[in-house]
Amino acid sequence: MFVWIRKYLVFLLILVLVGCSSPSWEGVAPPEVSSSEPQMILALWDSLTAGYNLELREAYPAQLEGILQENSYNYEVTNAGVSGDTSGDLLERIGLYDDMEVYLYLISIWGNDGLRSMDLDDMQSNIEAIITHIQAVNTDAKIVLSGMQIPQNLGLNYARQFKAVFEDIADDTGVVYYDFLLEWVAGNRSLNLPDAIHPNARGYRIVAENMFSFLESSTLIIK
């Protein structure tokens, strides 16, 4: 009988020891998983950004965001394109974006100014005022100013002066200059809508790929 009692006590002791040594998960929070919110790229353009006559996902900003994500860059691209916008229109509404936490501004909204033969001094004044406003509100943001070209049938001298304005502004304001938004797309009928002005989805893919290559090679985006 004493042997049986001894075995029983040993068994109880083992249970107690096992219970003390076993980890208890009750009330223990799971390890935190760090997540990084994507930084914002704000595209402030006209119908060339808005995606005239296309789905929003086919427009340039959405395709750029897709390329960024495919290449492991954590950015979201917000499409703030408004069809028909001029530099004066953007200047009037630029304050609407003051509260956004923008990492990088992409600005190219001058096509309508050129098509309407706007005075180039007025256009330059508007663009510089837009850039100055952004720099005052968001001192850490990066800004890319994209140039634009207009058909020479609007006047050869005017077209040349129009193209030169953007480089001068970039030099004066210190923003990054991107030569031509529609490189390899403008004038290609297969990459544009029937109006021969606005890119189709395939054309926008090239625009987005070109911009991605520029941003990456200029180290304006980081992983």
Image (cartoon, rainbow, N blue to C red):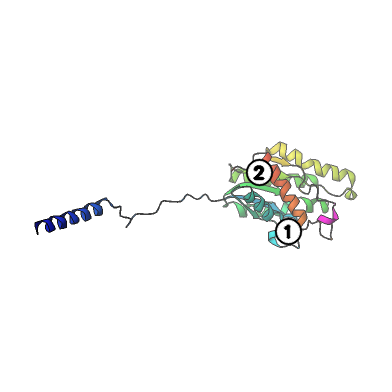
Q: Is residue 49 visible?
A: yes
Q: CA distance from mark 1 to mark 2?
A: 21 Å
**Residue pointed to by mark 2:** 143
Looking at the rendered image, the quarter that the C terminus falls into is top right
Q: Residue furthest left?
A: 2
Give the mark nearest the N terminus, 1 or 2: 1
In this view, the residue in front, 18 or 125, is 18
Q: Position of residue 41 (x, y in %)?
A: 63, 49
- The answer to if 100 sits in the magenta stretch is no
Label 1 crowd (10 A; few <14 / some 14-19 / many >=20): many
Side of 75 where 126 appears, left or right: right
Q: Answer few, some or many: residues within 10 Å of disc 2's Cα (few below 14, many 20 plus, some between 14 and 19).
A: many
Observer-nearest of 124 and 164 = 164
- What residue sits 81% from the left and 44% below the top? 162
Occupied quadrant, residue 216 = top right
- The answer to whether one can see residue 108 in this image is no
Q: Which residues are magenta?
A: 185-191
Q: Assign a secondary structure to mark 2.
A: strand
Amino acid at dot 2: Ile
Q: Position of residue 98 (x, y in %)?
A: 59, 51
Image quadrant in which the N terminus is located: bottom left
- Give the residue displayed 86% in from the left and 50% down from the top: 151
Left or right: 170, with 95 as reference point: right
Q: Are marks 1 and 2 in contact (CB under 8 Å)?
A: no
Q: Give the label, 1 or 2, closer to the camera.
A: 1
Secondary structure beneath disc 1? loop
Q: Which mark is residue 51?
A: 1
Is the residue 139 above or below the residue 202 in the image?
Answer: above
Amino acid type of the residue that numbered disc 1 sits on in the rendered structure: Gly
Side of 149 where 99 appears, left or right: left
